[in-house]
Amino acid sequence: MIPEPTAAAASRSSEQNTNSHAEATSSGAVNHSEDDSGNENRQKSVRRRKRAHKGSENVKRKSAKAGCSRASRAGGSKQKHVEAVTLFEVITMGRSAMQAVIDDWIEAYVADRDSSLLDLISFFIQCSGCKGVVTAEMCQSKEDSDVMSKMVEELDEDSAEYPLIQSGPYGRWFHSEFCDFVSVLVSQCQHSVIFDSYLMNTLISLLTELSNSYVRAFRHTCTLAAMKLLSALVGVALSLSIGIENSQKLYEVQKTKTVRQKSSQQLERIQKKITELQEKRAEVESMMDIIFKGVFLKRYRDVLPEIRSICMEELGLWMKLYSSAFLNDSYLKYMGWMMHDKLPDVRLKCVLGLQGLYGDPLLLPKLDLFTSRFKERIISMTLDKDNEVAVQTMKLLLLISKTSDEVLTPEDYKQLLQFVYSSQRPLAATAGELLFSRYNNPHHLKNKPTNTLLQFYQESELHKHVVYLVDSLWDCGGALLKDWPTLTSTLLQDSSSHSTAANNHFDVFMFQVMNTREKKIQTDDCLKLTEHLLMVLPRLLSKVLYISPFDSLCRSAFVGVCDVLTAHSYQLHVWDPTSFGPLLFTTSPKLQRALLTFVCVHVFVASDCDNQSKVGENSEVERLEDLHRRRNLLAAYCKLIMHGVLEMSMATEVFMYYMKYYNDFGDIIKETMYRTRQVDKIESARTLVLSLQQVRVQTFTSIKELARRFALTFGDLVKFRECVVMIHRNGIEFVFQEFSQTPGTATPPYLSYLTILSEFSSKLLKPDKKTVFSYLQKHTAEHIIDLREETWQPLIYYRASLLAAAEGEDAVSYVSSDRKPYQPHRSPFSKPKLEGMFTVVCTEWLQSKSSSSHSFSLLLNLQHL
């Protein structure tokens, strides 16, 4: 494995045996600027030298000299006596120190190559986690197995880890530094000792032998070193190729000169340089071939997945950087075979390597045979169980489709484009980019993009996944999806066969695309979108109603369900429970939520405003009929709450609309409040509080007036005393619970809710006011409150409403006088913004039309703008 050292080297090593103990003792003192990792390595080195007292150790005489120079260059130390460090310890010093130390090692190698090479061999042994030290006597042995057996004996058997696989950041850091060392070593040696036919032969022989070891630590570490060594040699070969190319250009320039300007000696000198560089490149390529055959071919199918990943990752790099030597079918076949590996990381490295090859147009002609042979395997990997492998494979196929139109057939595209409906968003987005690029090529430009998109949607036959389709195209085709004028003009175009199923299907699809696209609209597009839709939205909504004739059927089904549930609840109070026990039915939470959603969509569909300027000029009779239908739906739902079929909390969202729809449904909602209060007055009051809190979170516009109307429903103060107290306690907890005061959040986020809560203070009895005030003080005692700050005005106002004990006194008069005076131009409470023109137009129109699931879902999404 290692060439036999000279006799002089053996004699020097034997002379140093007598001083090994002294050197080992003194090696403990090192520059204090090194980190703990370096100290630990030096301590291990001391123990190793003590164990190898009887054997000849690495030559330290020249290393000490080199250590002084590298310490002064890398660390800037001014000490005269600097202890030498091993190459293994140099890894802890960083890349700059690494270069300085390797330069010193090269100088030592030129003076005495055997002893310096012994240090390099020991470096790779130590990086494998072995505690043993390679001595000159061991290297004199002709049997490589003797050295291997002795190193295995010194391997740390108590620990299953070695530096490359250690957990945590240390393992990743060591991997990076170890690879850098090999790269810097070859880079610094490329102009000198790399061509001496001794260093590289010995190093390649060592790494080849250790990479074939049955010991995992040796095999993993030295395989990585050999692969990085080959990658570094690729860099050397590329540098030589550039030098040859430049010299050839210079030679051609010299040949074109006139006879007087020509110099035969200069031409001969340039030709000699070209020949020398070509010989060096051939020698480097010979080294690469030896490493490939001696290490790669034996390890690319290693039982250890980390080794297989290393081989595939480096192979892709070689083929991309040095394509003249590596990019051919003899090397590509290994990449294709390993795409069938059982470990996802190995497959991922193959796909990433192929992305680098297909991304370079100059390399594509050399990939034709590989593509035709392994195309089916690449397409099947889009279904890989590992998400990252599937995504990267789809990106690879996207590269292939952009560079060559003939590789992927229509059947291949049909299979791949279905991934736009995948639940994995990265995979769907990449498939969407493939879809967008395919339908944007010149072959499909004869049709409109919207028509092409519809054609794909119809062929896919997945009509319930428009949301997935739009989301997949959003990143690459956002310009098309944001082109509202084109989309709306396509919908409004006249068609002679408007009643056909195909046209209806097209209209539904386009509405779904627009609806989904609206949900993803960016803030800066809102104004432009509003200005456009103000003109065409009424006509679009009219067309939606034509497509949705089954709305009356939905209402009939809802009323039928409510009647059945109400009749069943009535029978529970009349019949003997034991006689119809098997027929007992309880509404599930899913059914309750579905009923509530239907009411919100089909009843509360328009604002309470004047309906004189309605689109379509509907008659007053039609308006009253639509209102009657909606009142029947709401009454049927409220009956379920009154009779206990639905939980009382399901009335929360209904109560939220008490003020907004007071003229249309105020009597029904108010009656529901009274009826639920008769059933359970505490639970009913809790439902009112929940309504106010939910409205507060959603920044409802008339919340204060709504609270005032709720308070008016508590007429008998004694009867509802407990309910009112519960409302105040619940409100205080809502504001202060789970609030921790920080410099960034000095006040609770919902502090203004106390202003709303003060509307119920007048319903408290005098003793209860003191109780609630004490409860408030308990929650505010832990916070630093400055009553002079305007941000705390809601608390001041609420405290004043509780302290107003005298009849007829205004709560505001009890506000503390030590706060700042009220400034008329600054409102203490931020008023909610009025609804914009866009929402007003929508709500006015919907008040005049019979509601439908399609029209409301579209409006509901548009209102979020």
Image (tube, grey):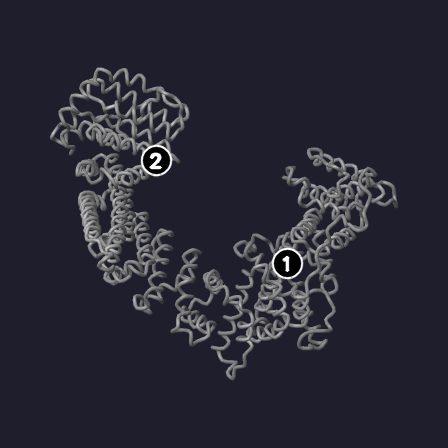
SS under mark 1? helix
Q: Among all residues in the image, which is located at the extreme front?
A: 260
Give the answer, above or below, for where 578 lies relative to 844. Answer: above
Image coordinates for residue 768, horizontal then vertical, percent: 78, 39
* Picture quadrant of residue 77: top left
Q: Nearer the viewer, residue 650 or 341?
A: 341
Q: With 232 as the anchor, is 768 left or right in this view?
A: right
Q: Nearer the viewer, residue 808 or 109?
A: 109
Q: Which residue is mark 2?
A: 174
User: Mark 1 = which residue?
Assistant: 640
Q: Is residue 558 left or right of residue 660?
A: left
Depth check: 828 or 238 in front? 238
* Screen quadrant of the N terminus: top left
Q: Of callouts 1 and 2, which one flags the residue occurring earlier in the amino acid sequence?
A: 2
In the picture provided, is 91 more to the left or to the right than 521? left
Looking at the rendered structure, the secondary structure element under dot 2 is helix
Q: Amino acid at mark 1?
A: Leu
Picture quadrant of residue 233: top left
| Residue 343 rendering spot, x and y as whole percentages | 30, 47
* Residue 620 in view of the camera: yes
Judge the density around disc 2: few (<14), some (14-19), many (≥20) Cα neighbours within 10 Å. some
Q: Nearer the viewer, residue 352 or 567?
A: 352
Front position among marks 1 and 2: 2
Q: Amino acid at mark 2?
A: Phe
